[in-house]
């Protein structure tokens, strides 16, 4: 096992998985396999020194993470901002939240509503890198930080995240072939 600068072994996916509750391990494995198989999204997995599992699809500016070893365990996904050093400003690489919600709503309006309600409200921080994004869905508005959706660690919410990423992946694939 690779060692971190502190001399402790660097966490791996399997070592984090082993510390997670037994009931979550199969869901975590299923999510891992699902995300890594998506094309064109092409997620790659990283486990940080704290044992947080992160997946990033850099070409499309979206990330997903599982925090299973923290007191308030959860999983989340959202869009991320990049900094343009020349222009000296932050920008979104991509954000298709409203488009994905609209597509999900065609067949499962309850899921679309649940994802919208799961968007983390922005605390109106003043940092330029805060990543405030405004969304509208079904006549409601939300100002969020990074368009981050926070989900519970349960089978239903893992399924909801896979449904979201499946729709996003389909939208991207159709756009790439158009």
Image (cartoon, rainbow, N blue to C red):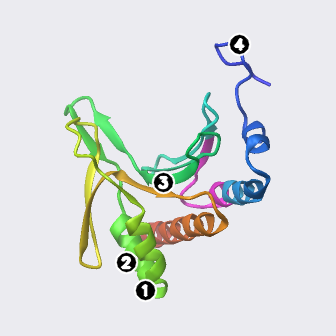
Helix, strand, or loop for circle 3? strand
Residue 79 rendering spot, x and y as whole percentages: 40, 52
In the rendered structure, which disc, 3 or 1, sits on the residue that comes first in sequence?
3
Residue 108 placement (x, y as % from top left): 48, 83
Query: Which residue is outermost to the front?
Result: 71
Q: Which residues are magenta?
A: 34-45
Q: Which residue is mark 3?
A: 77
Q: Quadrant of the image for the C terminus?
A: bottom left
Q: Is residue 75 above or below residue 48?
A: below
Instruction: Please identify the quadrant where the N terminus is shown.
Output: top right
Residue ID for mark 2: 102
Label 2, label 3: how far apart the Cα atoms are:
18 Å
Q: CA distance from mark 4 to mark 3?
A: 31 Å
Callout 3 crowding tier (Cα within 10 Å): few <14, some 14–19, many ≥20: many
Q: CA distance from mark 2 to mark 1?
A: 7 Å
Q: Mark 1 to mark 4: distance in Å?
A: 52 Å
Which label's residue is closer to the chain start, 2 or 4? 4
Q: Mark 2 or mark 4, which is nearer to you?
A: 4
Q: Position of residue 19 (x, y in %)?
A: 76, 41
Residue density around tag 4, few if under 14, some if 14–19, many if 20 or more, within 10 Å: few
| Label 2 close to label 1 by CB (< 8 Å) | yes
Mark 1 against mark 4, which lies toward the viewer? 4
- 64 vs 165: above or below: above
Q: Which residue is mark 1?
A: 106
User: In which quadrant of the rendered view does residue 2 lie?
Assistant: top right
Q: In the rendered view, would you say 63 is above or below 51?
A: below
Res. 130 mark = none
Crowd tier of the residue under label 1, counting other residues whose Cα lies within 10 Å: few below 14, some 14–19, many 20 or above: few
Question: For this view, does 86 lie left or right of residue 154?
Answer: left
Q: CA–CA distance between discs 2 and 4?
A: 48 Å
């Amino acid at each position: 096992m690779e060692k971190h600068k502190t001399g402790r072994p660097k966490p791996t996916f399997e070592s984090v998985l082993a510390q997670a509750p037994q009931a979550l391990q199969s869901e975590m494995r299923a999510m891992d396999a699902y995300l890594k198989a998506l094309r064109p999204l092409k997620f790659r997995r990283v486990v940080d020194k704290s044992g947080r599992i992160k997946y990033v699809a850099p070409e499309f500016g979206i990330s997903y993470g599982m925090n299973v070893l923290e007191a308030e365990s959860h999983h989340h996904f959202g869009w991320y901002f990049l900094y343009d050093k020349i222009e000296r400003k932050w920008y979104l690489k991509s954000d298709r939240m409203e488009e994905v919600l609209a597509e999900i709503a065609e067949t499962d309006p309850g899921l679309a509503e649940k994802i919208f309600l799961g968007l983390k409200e922005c605390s109106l921080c003043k940092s330029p890198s805060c990543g405030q994004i405004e969304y509208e869905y079904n006549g409601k508005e939300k100002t969020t930080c990074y368009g981050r959706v926070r989900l519970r660690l349960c089978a239903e919410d893992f399924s909801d995240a896979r449904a979201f990423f499946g729709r996003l992946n389909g939208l991207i694939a159709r756009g790439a072939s158009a």
